[in-house]
Image (cartoon, rainbow, N blue to C red):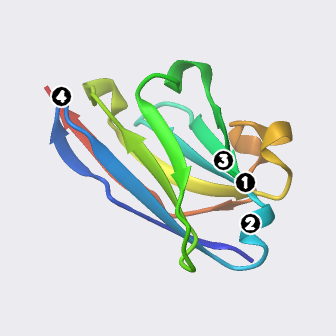
Amino acid sequence: QVLLVESGGGSVQTGGSLRLSCVASGVSYSRKCMGWFRQAPGKEREGVASISGGRTYYADSMKDRFIISQGISRNKVVYLQINNLKPEDTATYYCAAARSPCVVVGTRPDEYNEWGQGTQVTVSS
């Protein structure tokens, strides 16, 4: 079983940046597709980006200000850099792992099997 712990959220002003981190522990991290998702109050969870083996996949609306990357360390970290933050980015951001390759699951939340507890991002105007 994979344990995912997110961090790095916070309250920022419009135009600011944040880097979210997800530390993964468990089996076969390197063979899992890791993804970032977000959920705003009253809205459905939506995919942001996913990564496996250095290959990245982005939801169409997330390609300009979001950057997903992997750390090269024993801690097995996945990052999400968010630039030029806007109030509409306010949401809880989740890290998740899928058993299928990223090329198959993309950024579809229903395809992911394990989830972290989320980290809150709040952007003020």
Residue at 61 percent across and 27 percent down: it is: 59
Q: Which residue is mark 3?
A: 51
Mark 4 crowd level (few <14, some 14–19, many ≥20, 10 Å Cα): some
Dots 3, 4 in contact, CB < 8 A: no
Number of disc labels: 4
Q: Which residue is mark 1?
A: 53
Dots 1, 3 in contact, CB < 8 A: yes
Which element carries disc 1, helix, strand or loop?
Answer: loop
Could you tell me the amino acid type at mark 1? Gly
In the image: residue 52, left or right of residue 61: right
Q: Which residue is mark 2?
A: 30
Q: How far apart are the alpha carbons under marks 1 and 3? A: 7 Å
> In the picture, which quadrant includes the C terminus?
top left
Identify which residue, 83 or 4, lies in the foreground. 83
Mark 1 crowd level (few <14, some 14–19, many ≥20, 10 Å Cα): some
Q: How far apart are the alpha carbons under marks 4 and 1? A: 32 Å
Could you tell me the amino acid type at mark 4? Thr
